[in-house]
Structures are given as structure tokens and as C-alpha cells.
Image: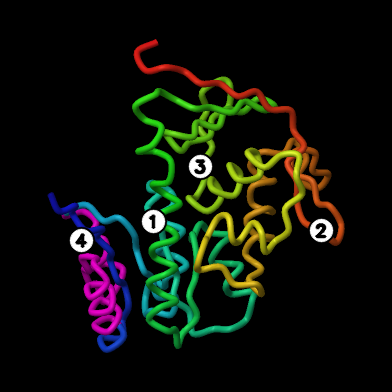
Amino acid sequence: MVNNPHVILVVDDDPQIQDLTAHLLANNGFKALKAGCTAEADAVLAGGHVDLIVLDIMMPKEDGRQFCQRIRQTSRIPIIMLTALRDDIDRIVGLEIGADDYVTKPFTPLELVARVKAVLRRVSDGAADHAPDGSRQYVFNDLVLDVDRRRLQRLDSTEIDLTSGEFSLLLTLIESRPRVLSRDQLLDLTRGASSNPFDRSIDTHISRLRKKIEPDPRRAQIIKTVRNLGYAFSGKVEKLNRRAGR
């Protein structure tokens, strides 16, 4: 039995890049859909299931940043942003507003495919393996991280919205505690083959996570910075394994 391919929506106002990207993804086993602007992307999203969006930043009218910000208000669909800008600030801003990853133009085919596979893997990792046995959960502070449902909630059931990258980073830190992980190790563990030793997005994800889970992000007590080494999860954690049907 053949598995249905992942559906990737390519949003780019440059027809040549749009066609080349869609062709590349199709040649690597994905089903590629195309949109030349965010209005066309809205129509595609309204018309059916999409697993991931490859989104250009520089577009007329509503640009990629605005579109990403709007999508994040209602959806957790993974987003990889394409940017011709090499300034770290532009990439960090993309991550701050909810993008899961970014690729700088011009990009190599192998890099884009690796990034797409890594983000999709982060989204689905663990769900198939653990679903038959029930729900695996980590409780810390007033928070509950549900591994199989890939969600973070407060004890009062208020849900905290995490991107797939933030979820994977938090889970990696929890399951590695009290070990200190360097930025390179965190990139390897959360991105696999697509990691880049000069990528600063780990710092951005850590900053965003702290804003969401720390009582005072400026004086972090849950995710600690270990100077010259990396990061470590220092919160007290209780692991729960709830069997299905209970």
C-alpha cells in the first residue's frame, strides 16, 4: 500500500521560482501546490488539506511576514520562509512571528528538501509510535506537555500555542535533562541532517519558549543558559504515562 504524499503549498510571486520549487518538491515525492500571492494561498488552504507551506517573504500587497502572522492566529501548519535577505535580523523576525524554519535564496535543492523533511518529521515524530499505548505527558511548574497530541497546556487546560520547532526543542530539553546541550547538539537533535552550525535560530526559539513558559523570561528558571556551553532544562518534571481508555 502506497502512502499518500505530503502536500506542500509553494507561495511565491516569481513564477520561475514557484515552478522550480514545485517541480523540485514533486521530484522528491511530495505533492506540490502553487500560489502566486497570499490571496491565492488562502483559496488553496480553504479548498483542502496542506501539510506545509513554503512561503516567500518579499511579495506585493500582503508580504510573507504578514501572511505568516495571520496564519498563526488560527493554525499551526508548518511554515518555511524563503528569503533573499541574508541579514540575521530578517530571519529572526520570521521565526519570532511563528515560522518554523527559513531558507535563504539562492538555495540548493538538497537544502530545501532537507528542511522540508526535517520540519515534517518534527511535526509527526513520536505520534505513530506512542499512540497505541496512550498519552505520554511531562508535567512541570503549572504546565503539561502532551507528547502524543503535541500540545502544551496549563493545569487549568489553557492551551499555549507552540510551533513545531518550539515543541521539538522543549521536548528535547526535557528528555535530555539535566544534561547541558550546546546549540549544535540542539540543532542536530531537532533538525537532523538539515542543521547548520552557524544557525542562530536556536537562540530565537529559546527566547520565544521562555516568553511562553517562564514566569519571568528575563530571569529564566526553567530553561537555563549555561555560559559558554549551551542550555539545560532545570525545572522539576513529573512523567505521566496514561493508558488508552483510562
Residue at the farthest left position: 1
* CA neighbours of label 3 inside 10 A, class few (<14), some (14 to 19), many (20+): some
Mark 3 vs mark 1, foreground winner is 1
Give how far across and how far down residue 62 sits, in percent.
Answer: 38, 71
Q: CA distance from mark 2 to mark 3?
A: 28 Å
Specify the amino acid type for callout 2. Answer: Leu
Q: Pick whichever of labels 2 and 4 is earlier in the sequence.
A: 4
Q: Pick whichever of labels 3 and 1 is earlier in the sequence.
A: 1
* CA neighbours of label 4 inside 10 A, class few (<14), some (14 to 19), many (20+): few
Please state, as top left, top right, bottom left or bottom right, where the C terminus lies in the image: top left
Q: Pick whichever of labels 3 and 4 is earlier in the sequence.
A: 4
Mark 2 vs mark 4, foreground winner is 2
Is 217 contained in the magenta span? Answer: no
In the rendering, which numbered label is found on residue 63? none
Task: Write down the residue under mark 4.
Answer: 43
Query: Looking at the picture, does residue 42 appear above or below residue 132?
Result: below
**Apparent side of residue 63 relative to residue 166 in the rendered image (left or right):** left
Give the residue drawn at x 22%, y 52%: 49
Say which of 228 and 129 sits in front.
129
Residue at the farthest right position: 227
Task: Write down the residue under mark 1.
Answer: 120
Give how far across and how far down residue 74 sits, in percent.
Answer: 38, 46
Q: Please, what is the dominant secondary structure of the magenta stretch?
A: helix
* CA neighbours of label 2 inside 10 A, class few (<14), some (14 to 19), many (20+): few
**Apparent side of residue 78 relative to residue 104 in the rendered image (left or right):** left
Q: Label 4: state its secondary structure.
A: helix
Task: Write down the residue under mark 3.
Answer: 161
Q: Which residues are magenta?
A: 18-47
Give the residue drawn at x 58%, y 55%: 189
Total marks placed: 4
Task: Write down the residue under mark 2.
Answer: 229
